[in-house]
Structure formats: C-alpha cells, structure tokens
Image (tube, rainbow, N blue to C red):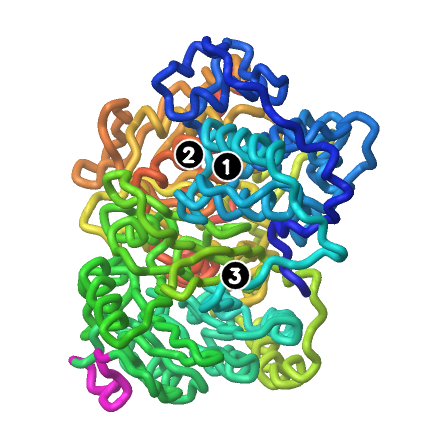
C-alpha cells in the first residue's frame, strides 16, 4: 500500500508555459488595512492584488502573517497562472465537492498534475502548508525559475499568506524576463545528496487484543512489501485489558508479536500492573526474555529488582540483543545510523504497581540520550514514548518533550490512546522560537490501526519531507498463520469466558431500553446494574488516591447488556462492559459537575447515551423544565459524618469515571477541558474487572434501585 502525501508531480512545460505572466509594479498604496508599507511582504501583496491574483477578507484585511492552508495556496497559485477554474474536471477528492470555495483551483491544478492528494483520496484543504510543500509545487511548474527567497526558510516551516504572495510575485516577475528551456520529457526532481528515507510502522496500547494481531500482521507485511528501510515499533501497554492477559500474562500476545517482528518496544505503565502480586514482575521479566526484539527505556531503572538481573543496562547499544533492555539502541539501516530511545510516564508510580522499579525525569533523560547519540555520530533520533501526546502537562507528554529537547526528529507515542490521523509537527520551543521540526505520531488503541510514517532526512539528519496515515485494521484480512498460532490461546479464553465467577443472583440485573409503551431505560433512569458498576468504580478509585473521591459516574450508553438470573459468568460480566474502558480520576468544580449533569439530563425523560449513573451521591432533577435548567440538587455522601452534603460551585472535587467520559465523550465538554488542563488521571484499570470485583465483594446483590436519581416531574 503506497502512502501518498501531497506529492507534486512534474508537468510538461507546454501545459503551463503560456499561463505565466509578468506582474506590474506594486501600487503605491496598500489595499488592505493590515498591510502597511513597512511590512516585509507589502510590495508583493500590493502587486498581486493589482493584478487580480489575490484578494483579502470581507473586513478589508489580508492577514499576511497567518499560515496558508492547502486550499488557499491552490487558489493563489491557480490565479497566478491564470488557469481556468470554472470549466474543470472534478478531481474526485472525498473532501472536495463543487460547493467547496477552493474546488475550481484545486481541480485545475490537479488536472495538470501539479498537485495530488493523500492516499485516502482526500485533499485536506484546511491543512496548513509548509515551505517544503510549496517548493515542490513551484518546482513542478517548468515555466517558473528557481527562487532564491524560497531558500530562506526551513522546509518544515509553515508558510504565511504574505510569504506566499512574495514567492508568487518573484516567480512571475522572473518568468516574464527569463525563457526557460522546455524539456522533451518530464523529469522527477533529484533526491538531494545525502538524503535518507525511512518508513516507520507503529502501534501502541494494544492491551492484550491478541485476537486482532493477525490483521496487524497482514498490514505490516503489506507495508514491508512496498517500502524499504522499514522500522516497526511498539509504544507500550501490551499488558492488561482482556482475558488473554488474565490467563497468559503476556505470553499469547508475545507469541504473535514475535511472529510479526518488531525492532523495539518501550514499556507502558500497564507492563507494571503485577508488581504488587506475590510473583511480582516475574511475568514481565519472562516477557522480556522471550521477546525476539530489544526494549528501550531511558528513564526506567530496573536495577533494584533482581528479576531483571542480566536483562537491563542503562547504556545505549549499537549491537542490541533481543530480549534485553537498553536506554537506547542504534540501528544501522541501508548504511545510515538511526537512534531509538524510550521513555515511560512517571505517572506509573501512581497508576500501576512498579514495586522496586523506579522512574526519573523524562526531559533530563531525553537530553542525555540525544547527547549520547550525537556523540556517537547519530543524527537521526527517534523517541519511542509512553507518556501521552497531550497528557497531564504537570507530569509528562510528547508535545512538551518535543519543545524542551532539541535533536529529536520523531516521537512515536502511546499512553493516552490519541488517534493522530497524520503526523503532528512541533517546530517551536517552549518560548515560541523556531526549531528544527519534530514529528509526533500515535495510532489510537486496541490494534484498531497500524500507524505509518514516511520521513526523509537531509545529510545533516534534519527532516525535510514526511507523510503518514493510519491504516484501519478492521478492513484488513487476517494472516492465517497467526490465526492458527492463536488457536490454543483462544480455546482457553473461550473456556474461561464460560467460567462462573462465584456469584449467583435470584433475579435479573436488568438493562432496560425504552419502548413506545415504557420509557424506562439505562439511558434515562437509575438502574441496579448502574449502581453496582459505579459503586465498584468509587471503591476502586479510592484505593489509588489520598484525595477523597466524592462520587463515581458511568454513562448509560456504555452499559450494554443485562446479567440474567443464575450463576454469573466471566463472559456475562464482559458483555455488560465490552469496550475495554478504564477507570479515571477527575478534579472538577461543583459548577462543572452541575453543567455535566445538565448534559446528562438534556433529553430526559427520553434516552441519552450520556445519561450518568451515580455512585456515592444523589441527584434530583425536573424533566419538565427546559433543557439546561433541570438540575434541582446534587449531594454527595460525606463519609466523615455519614450525611449527604450539597455540592458547592466553586469547590473542587475528585470524581471517578471511565476514560471515555473523562475525555469528553458524549458531549461532556467540561470534562474535555479538565482533561486538556491536566486534571484527569487515567488509572488504567479495566472496567469489567472492576465490576467483577464489586460483584464478588457484595454479600447481597440488589436488583432494585435506591432512589439515587429522582425525577421530580414524575412525583407531581
């Protein structure tokens, strides 16, 4: 499968030779209120406006210092070349139809093969364009000479509207005075001397989804068949999440990961979940020993745990061995050296059980790793991280890593399960100064996607070109050899799924859905099952923080099935909460909680997937009132006094919920804001396992509700 970024193809000179025009001298006065004569791009903007090539905004401004989007660039370039943008053939990009304001210019340029779109058949007109991209466009038009001013910017710098105007004006001025030779046949631009291209395949947070690894195997194989210089990386959290881990402690996943073939893996926080068990980290040590690839982790110290004796060194190795742990490794690929080092979130201390394993500051260790690589003559450096793309800034995340540590070219990340559909470029430091670009990629979670990144470095190891996408593994066929390899593990998992957990209920724990005759629903009413789930969340969360957790919340849309009367099985518990969600802690104000409950109740008495079930608190509301004004009272149980206390708007409370809700799912924007501000901690504890634990803890499983959520309109 070819990963196409915006490739700009050479076209014949004849197609465009007659369209380039000489531009008249600039007007004395600027037509735009925000383009003064002192502005660096004043002359070019005035000139192109006078020539009818550019226009401004309705408010009379041009906004010369804002970044240019791909659509805006297409419009300006097509205008400069005087292309017919009305009677043009549909370019057939999924995100460009005839109503799009840039349809004509994009279609005209695409028709001449000056520009193309992405591998998923999109053009992405609202994505900003870089100087490298623009240089390729201009270079693909043989009537336009080489531009000296284009060399004044790094290829990865974003292009402003003013800069683009200057480049176009310079190109047209030079093309009117120079007669370029017309080549007999199109020629592709030569690869710069010393350039090196690398393809990175990556996954993260696979969380024991062993049954999806046969699809991953197929996708990886297809990528390797079409690309050269391929690295395959795992950004951590292979442990925990399904019965495959409960039963095999990583062995099932590793059997398939070894068969797929990886170049390196970093440890995620969940790799340390078993530290408090009687066996400690024996399963992790066995996982490392049996791996047919090395591990990298620069800020994790295993030296105090004798289970890792002989497996761990804090050095960087240019001859790494499989089944060993290093701070970093050097891979030689096609004669070029590539450095890879790892980082694990320091939050592991609070959200897992690392026991004797300790962690140091990620920024400090990253700087040491980069310095070590550079001292070895390595100028292409990859950070393989499990710290989160934009996770808690008070602890660590990839954006801060990129801004604080120069010299990192690529960050392949995990931990916060972010779906980065294309690489993110960080080209400024912490104070906004320009820096060499760092690319950040992450491939969501649960083997849903294989991430791809194609990157080209110049002779100095600086990123000059890049492209990336996520391959949807749900659309990929299984590798039959891995299906067969998984069979004995799968048979055992199926057997365990039917295993009884040791709890029997006389009546069904219902999970109602609304009908025309009855509006009672898990998505609009309190249920006994919802109460048990949230009580389990509350009890579990309190074990992981010194703060008082005042309540727990579970969205009704996440509760998917009832538990029938009789002996409860593991499979039935998983069917109730099948999404593999994890437990999270949020610090939110009383006002934010009230706003959240208004979202929860917006459709009452009708269904809403975001309807919140509650543990540790009581809610009264009035569904007859206007949406947004329905909450009457919210009280939480004060454990010190045993009495219910009303929430205070300005006070901050710690609340437990699932990670989906904590990140703003179901329209909880106030929670999304808290997440963005670092007020959320994902404990990484499986929701169905929490439910099973809660059921086992109960002397009596109640199948009736308790009046935690009351609609006063029904009492009138």
Query: Against 8, is 53 above or below?
Result: above
Counting from the top left corner in percent of width and height, residue 165 is at 51, 28
Q: Main secondary structure of the magenta part?
A: loop
**SS category of the residue bearing label 2:** loop
Could you classify mark 2 by the number of other residues whose Cα lies within 10 Å: few (under 14), some (14-19), or many (20 or more)? some
Label 1, label 3: how far apart the Cα atoms are: 46 Å
**SS category of the residue bearing label 1:** loop
Range shown magenta: 304-315
**SS category of the residue bearing label 3:** strand
Q: Nearer the viewer, residue 637 or 494?
A: 494
Circle 2 sits on which residue?
708
**Res. 332 image quadrant:** bottom left
- Residue 453's disc is 3
Please tell me whether residue 191 belongs to the stretch shown in magenta. no
Circle 1 sits on which residue?
526
Could you classify mark 1 by the number of other residues whose Cα lies within 10 Å: few (under 14), some (14-19), or many (20 or more)? many
Quadrant location of the N terminus?
bottom right
Query: Against 401, is 150 above or below?
Result: above
Label 2, label 1: how far apart the Cα atoms are: 7 Å
Q: Image point 40% across, 28% down: which residue? A: 619
């Amino acid at each position: 499968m070819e990963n196409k970024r915006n490739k700009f193809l050479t076209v014949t000179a004849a197609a465009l030779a007659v369209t380039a025009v000489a531009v008249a001298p600039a007007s004395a006065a600027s037509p735009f209120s925000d383009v003064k004569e002192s502005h660096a791009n004043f002359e070019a903007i005035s000139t192109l406006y006078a020539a009818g090539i550019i226009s401004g905004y309705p408010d009379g401004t041009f906004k010369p210092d804002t970044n240019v989007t791909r659509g805006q660039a297409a419009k300006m370039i097509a205008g400069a070349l005087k292309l017919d943008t009305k009677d043009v053939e549909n370019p057939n990009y999924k995100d460009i139809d005839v109503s799009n304001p840039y349809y004509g210019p994009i279609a005209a340029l695409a028709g001449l093969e000056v520009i193309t779109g992405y591998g998923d058949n999109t053009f992405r007109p609202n994505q900003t364009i870089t100087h490298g991209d623009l240089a390729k466009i201009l270079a693909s038009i043989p009537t336009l000479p080489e531009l000296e001013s284009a060399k004044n910017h790094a290829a990865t710098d974003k292009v402003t509207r003013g800069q683009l105007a200057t480049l176009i004006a310079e190109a047209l001025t030079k093309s009117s005075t120079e007669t370029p030779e017309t080549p007999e046949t199109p020629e592709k631009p030569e690869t710069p001397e010393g350039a090196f291209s690398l393809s990175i395949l990556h996954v993260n947070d696979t969380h024991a989804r062993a049954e999806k690894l046969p699809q991953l195997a197929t996708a990886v194989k297809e990528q390797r068949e079409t690309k050269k210089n391929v690295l395959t990386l795992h950004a951590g959290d292979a442990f925990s999440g399904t019965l495959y881990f409960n039963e095999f402690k990583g062995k099932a996943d590793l059997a398939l990961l070894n068969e797929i073939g990886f170049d390196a893996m970093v440890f995620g926080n969940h790799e340390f979940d078993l530290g408090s068990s009687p066996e400690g980290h024996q399963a992790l040590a066995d996982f490392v020993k049996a791996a047919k690839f090395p591990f990298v982790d620069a800020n994790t110290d295993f030296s105090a745990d004798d289970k890792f004796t002989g497996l761990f060194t804090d050095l960087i190795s240019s001859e790494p061995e499989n089944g060993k742990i290093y701070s970093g490794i050097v891979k030689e690929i096609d004669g070029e050296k590539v450095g890879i080092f790892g980082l694990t979130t320091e939050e592991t201390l609070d959200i897992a059980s690392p026991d004797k394993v300790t962690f140091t500051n990620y920024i400090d260790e990253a700087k040491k790793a980069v310095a070590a690589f550079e001292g070895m003559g390595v100028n292409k450096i990859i950070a393989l991280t499990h710290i989160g793309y934009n996770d808690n800034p008070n602890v660590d995340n990839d954006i801060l890593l990129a801004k604080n540590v120069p010299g990192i070219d690529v960050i392949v990340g995990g931990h916060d399960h972010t779906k980065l559909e294309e690489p993110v470029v960080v080209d400024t430091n912490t104070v906004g100064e320009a820096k060499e670009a760092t690319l950040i990629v992450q491939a969501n979670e649960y083997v849903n996607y294989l991430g791809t990144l194609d990157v080209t470095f110049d002779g100095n190891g600086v990123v000059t070109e890049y492209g990336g996408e996520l391959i949807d593994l749900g659309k990929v066929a299984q590798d039959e050899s891995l299906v067969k390899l998984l069979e004995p593990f799968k048979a055992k998992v199926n057997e365990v799924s039917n295993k009884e957990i040791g709890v029997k209920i006389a009546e069904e724990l219902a999970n109602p859905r609304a009908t025309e005759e009855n509006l009672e629903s898990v998505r609009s009413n309190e249920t006994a099952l919802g109460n048990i789930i949230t009580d389990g969340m509350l009890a579990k969360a309190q074990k992981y923080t010194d703060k008082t957790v005042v309540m727990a919340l579970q969205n009704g849309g996440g509760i998917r099935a009832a538990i029938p009367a009789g002996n409860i099985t593991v499979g039935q518990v998983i069917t109730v909460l099948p999404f593999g969600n994890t437990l999270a802690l949020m610090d939110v104000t009383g006002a934010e909680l009230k706003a959240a409950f208004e979202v929860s109740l917006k459709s009452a008495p009708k269904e809403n997937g975001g309807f919140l079930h509650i543990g540790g608190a009581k809610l009264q509301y009035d569904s007859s009132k206007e949406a947004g004004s329905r909450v009457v009272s919210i009280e939480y149980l004060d454990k010190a006094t045993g009495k219910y206390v009303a929430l205070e708007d300005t006070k901050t409370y710690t609340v437990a919920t699932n990670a989906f809700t904590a990140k703003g799912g179901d329209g909880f924007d106030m929670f999304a804001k808290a997440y963005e501000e670092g007020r959320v901690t994902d404990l990484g504890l499986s929701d169905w396992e929490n439910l099973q634990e809660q059921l086992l803890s109960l002397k009596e499983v109640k199948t009736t509700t308790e009046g935690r959520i009351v609609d006063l309109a029904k009492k009138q």
